[in-house]
Image (cartoon, helix red, strand yellow):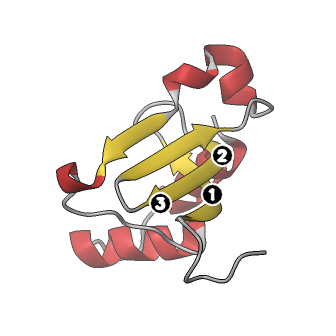
Amino acid sequence: GKSPSKRRFNKYEMRRITRFDGSVGGTTLLTSNAFIFRANVSDKLVIRNGQSTYNVSIPLDSISEVLMFESFDQLLENIQATTKVEGCERCSEIKQKLVQGT
């Protein structure tokens, strides 16, 4: 592999959370110019709805903020903290939908 100083991008395997469909697995590339997400062709949402539905390519100068979490639990904790909701009744349901991608 190349040393970090010679790499032209950072690559991450992650899930993109969609507004209506749940989450879709894929690869994110962060370059000096763009944030790019490519959905896995084997993901069940991609099979059902097509890869182009979930792929994203955004110029970095158009992005004001990106949030990435190590786990869905961290994501849900962040939602609870920022919304000041004590004891999320639907958190388990939301987490299950995100993990399943539905």
Q: Amino acid at mark 3?
A: Leu
Quadrant for residue 58, please give it: top left
For the residues labelled 1 and 2, the Cα–Cα distance comes to: 6 Å
Q: Which residue is mark 1?
A: 14
Q: Please give the name of the residue rendered at 41% of the width and 52% of the height, measured from the top-left corner.
A: 35
Judging by the rendered image, the residue that carries numbered circle 3 is 30
The Cα atoms of the two marked residues, 1 and 3, are separated by 12 Å
Residue in the picture at 67% in, 25% down: 46
Numbered mark located on residue 26 in the image: 2
Q: Where 49 sits versus 44, above or below? A: above
**Does residue 30 appear left or right of residue 65 in this picture?**
right
Disc 1 or 2, which lies upstream in sequence? Answer: 1
Q: Position of residue 67 (x, y in %)?
A: 37, 66
Q: Please provide percent x and percent y for residue 3.
A: 67, 83
Q: Is residue 23 among what the camera can see?
A: no
Query: In the rendered structure, are the residues bearing label 1 and label 2 in contact, judged by CB atoms less than 8 Å apart?
Result: yes
Residue drawn at the location 65% of the way across and 46% of the way down:
26
Q: Is residue 63 left or right of residue 97?
A: left
| Mark 1 or mark 3, whichever is nearer to me | 3
Residue closer to the observer: 98 or 86 = 98
